Image: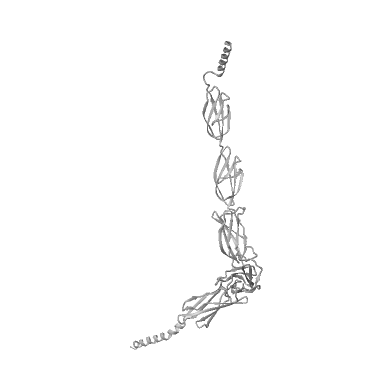
Amino acid sequence: MLKTSLKPVFVIIIIIFIITQFPVTMAEQYGTIQGRALDKDGNGIAGVSIKLQNGDCKTVATAVTGADGSYSFDRVPSPTGADIYRLLANFNKDGKSWDSGTAFFEVLALRITTKDIHFNDYPPSGMGCLYGVVTSDQNMIIPVPATIYLDNGMFIQYAGGRYDTWNFEQLPQGEYVVWAETNIGSETYTSIRYNVTVLSDQQGYLPIYLPTYIAGTNKVAYHSQPQPMKNLVHGVVLQKNGISCAGARVDLYQVSGSSQQLVSSTTANESGQYVFDYVDVRAMSQQFLVRVTVEAYGTAHSQDSGVFTVYYPNTLGVQHDISVPVSLNFANSGSLVLTTIPSGARISVDGVDTHYVTPCDIASLPAGIHSITLSHDDYYNDDFTVEILPDMTLAINRTLKTSTGASYINVKPAGAAIYIDGEFAGTSPLNLTNYPAGSHMYTIACNGYRNESGTIEIFPGEMINKEIDMVAVPGISLTYIGYLISSLVHQIFNIL
């Protein structure tokens, strides 16, 4: 009975304990913050000091990044389950201090929050920006179209619009002399020389005062202002045998240290020539290289040029027309060595007479399938195809088939005239040599005999014997006719 009456008491005690302990449990909840300190190239930065601040901007914890730039705050109080924090970071390098941080963000209880800290100005690029306007009044209200010059040869045109600025986007950090010039009519006006300092990863603003209404003080001898320039990179792609390489892929890369960035691509024309027009350089100068790639029979052959410098287009006193020839250690061609029996055969490749005769070595024949024709007097043309492989020599020997034969024609009686295909060939007995093979018409004529006609077949490389007996014509012979005429004349003279 006593045990039963005590049960409600125990339940009440347990409930009171849970109620009194609940706020404490919530207050002891934590979250985790982790991430990396990164430079502008995405590389981790070691040794960065990081402060963790709460919503009241009070520092509650500190950490230092490891070798890979990573950090972690493992017990970040989150009494409400979603609390506000921010990160402040700092490190010293080469005598300079670098600062960065994050905006406020939520940290959830029992969750991992990832926050990277970016140092967008580290490592220093060594490049800065200089921009400004040109005005003809000291209040910097009236813009003046002008050409802005730097003492390193760079210049830029300023249009002088209401909202226009001139801008040298990437200048090496350092000291410069800057001035502006403009031409009005036959007069050239110039500003004073400004000494400016360009700082790494910073923008410098310079308003230039160029009065055009004050006589004498700011005029110089008239001279025309330079026109905008352009950079032209061009060259020829050659195979190792000196033959141009048409159709090669040509890529232009910007080089910065060990990194390469593709800028533009083109294809070599039928003469192997390539052109990159208007190569843009925003800094004073940049490094480039040309890469040539040729694919042949499933294999890519590539060759880089040396690294060369291209300057800011509007720079005086430097070369803007840059020739970069590239020679491949590869030939997309091979050689064909031809011999024939008999020698002296004329050679045509793909229907074009090469003006060569066998034996012959035809070098630098483009790789691929080619049709070959060999022609020789008294022989049939020999047509065949060859496949030329890159950097390989193909040797071929061909035996030509003769296209002529011979025939011995013996006619009785001897001395008969023999005509072949309507042309007089000689008198019997007749020996025909190197005569075109095939069927030929003949006609044989002899005084006092009936003409003989027929065909004779000449076979290549063979001798054909032909025996022909002519048939005499029946009737009075010419001798007897002569005798009768002579007797008749004699009788007439006797009568007279």
Q: Is residue 219 in view?
A: yes
Q: Quadrant of the C terminus?
A: top right
Residue 279 is situated, as x and y percent measured from the top left of the image, at 58, 63
Name the residue: 55% across, 17% down: 481
Closer to the camera, 120 or 54? 120
Question: Residue 20 location, x and y as percent?
Answer: 42, 86
Quadrant of the image occupied by residue 70 = bottom right
Q: How many marks?
A: 0
The answer to which quarter of the image holds residue 174 is bottom right
Residue 290 vs 414, above or below: the answer is below
Q: Position of residue 244 (x, y in %)?
A: 60, 53
Residue toward you, 484 or 25: 484
Display colour scheme? one colour
Q: Nearer the viewer, residue 400 or 282?
A: 282
Tell whether 153 sits left or right of 1.
right
Viewport quadrant of the N terminus: bottom left
Q: Closer to the camera, 490 or 94? A: 490
Residue 190's place in the image compared with 21, above or below, is above
In this rendering, does residue 206 appear at all?
no
Relative to 491, is 26 above or below?
A: below
Residue 337 on image: x %, y %: 60, 46
Q: Is residue 439 above or below residue 216?
A: above
Q: Residue furthest top?
A: 495
